[in-house]
Amino acid sequence: MSKPLVSLQQFSSMQNRQSDPFAIKSQYKQYCQQHKEKRVRAFWQEHEKEPWFIEKYNPMTIYQAKMEHIDYVRGKAQKFFAQIPFKHLDLTKREDSGLEGP
């Protein structure tokens, strides 16, 4: 793994030249972002072959979970609409609004 993140004060003392505080803060923000990206990349590379990681981040597993959720919500919506006392209303049917697109 990479070196630990340093504080702004430590970062400014490590700079070779003295810059204005705004430039140092900007450089420190960029340093923090790069450090974060390195940590994420290192974590990914370290765990990408492990079964729990493959299962959690497998696109097919994610897709299946989303489809199960959609089916669950559809069932709940159908139960809800079935309990509405106004039987002459069909709230599940979409009428053509005359507009193009979804």
Image (cartoon, rainbow, N blue to C red):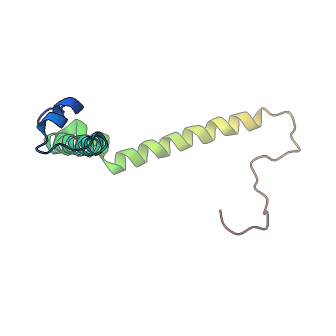
Residue 40 at x, y = what percent?
23, 42
Q: Quadrant of the N terminus?
A: top left
Q: Nearer the viewer, residue 39 or 6?
A: 6
In terms of depth relative to the viewer, which is nearer, 74 or 11?
11
Instruction: Note whether residue 99 is visible.
Output: yes
User: Residue, x 64% and y 35% (percent of image)?
Assistant: 76
Q: Quadrant of residue 49?
A: top left
Answer yes or no: is residue 1 visible. no
Residue at coordinates 85% horizontally, 45% vertically from top-left?
A: 89
* The quadrant where residue 4 appears: top left
Q: 40 or 71: nearer the eye?
A: 40
Left or right for 36, reference 17: right
Q: Position of residue 73 (x, y in %)?
A: 59, 39
On screen, residue 83 versus residue 35, left or right, reads right
Find residue 21 and report its image quarter. top left
Residue 72 screen position, x and y as percent: 56, 38
Residue at x-position 21% and y-position 30%: 9
